[in-house]
Amino acid sequence: MDEGVVKYRCDWKQAEPVSESEIADLIDWRDRLHSWGLIGVYENGIGFGNVSLRIGNSCQFVISGTQTAHLRAMGPESYCTVTEFNLEQNFLGCQGPVPASSESLTHAVLYLHRKDVGGIIHIHNPQLWQQLLFKIPTTRKEIPYGTPQMAWEMLRLFDEENLADRKILAMAGHEDGIICFGSSLDAAGKVLSAAMG
Ligand SMILES: [Zn+2]
């Protein structure tokens, strides 16, 4: 388990939080997922889960900050805006009151390659993961989370499996880890609810 470890070069500029009205959906969904235990902290103290929202039609997005998974309710001061990224260079630039989630590059690749993605949810749940593994598009076991390889692996799932239609994937190499997405966070949440039955 290596959740929370940043594996990319991160240029974080400390900055004011974005306005609450701009990320109302993000705040709603993040706190809802936390109340369901899909974002939270393992017994060993390691946090899991993160949520992001695309800014307009840009490739920038707002994402929950690193080390915030324990918070029950989370305001704009715990979110960060990803302003630039480069997968080849494994680089990410962000600005906000806290650095971006360590999973941010994985979100970035989806926003970059899929213009129809407006919101992304990454949760952890052992039962759902066991149930969905290899039944939905699944990243290979040897691909570690939070790496550029994971980003390319997700693109493989668009090419070789029906990820564009399913909009949900499991990560075999990242225990309990599931990512879903949609044109909005509500749409992504619907995909998750449907998978949970
Ligand atoms: Zn995770």
Image (cartoon, rainbow, N blue to C red):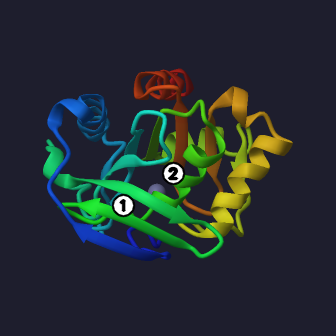
- The span from disc 1 to disc 2 (Cα, nearest Å) is 10 Å
Q: Which residue is mark 1?
A: 101
Q: Secondary structure at mark 1?
A: loop
Tell me if label 1 and label 2 are in contact, CB under 8 Å: yes
Q: For the point 46% across and 73% down, which residue is it?
A: 2
Q: Nearer the viewer, residue 54 or 179?
A: 54
Asked whether mark 2 and ligand 1 are closer than 8 Å, the reply comes as no
Q: Which residue is mark 2?
A: 107
Residue furthest to the right in view is 160
- Residue 118 place in picture, x, y as percent: 48, 32
Q: How many marks?
A: 2
Q: For the point 31% across and 42% down, which residue is it?
A: 37
Asked whether mark 1 and ligand 1 are closer than 8 Å, the reply comes as no
Sequence order check, earlier mark of 1 and 2 = 1
Q: Nearer the viewer, residue 127 or 58?
A: 58
- Residue 94 place in picture, x, y as percent: 35, 63
Q: For the point 55% across and 56% down, which residue is it?
A: 106
- Residue 178 place in picture, x, y as percent: 54, 46
User: Which corner quadrant of the image does residue 115 belong to?
Assistant: top right
- Residue 165 place in picture, x, y as percent: 71, 26
Q: For the point 55% across and 34% down, which residue is it?
A: 117
Q: Amino acid at mark 1?
A: Ser
Q: Amino acid at mark 2?
A: His
Q: Secondary structure at mark 2?
A: helix
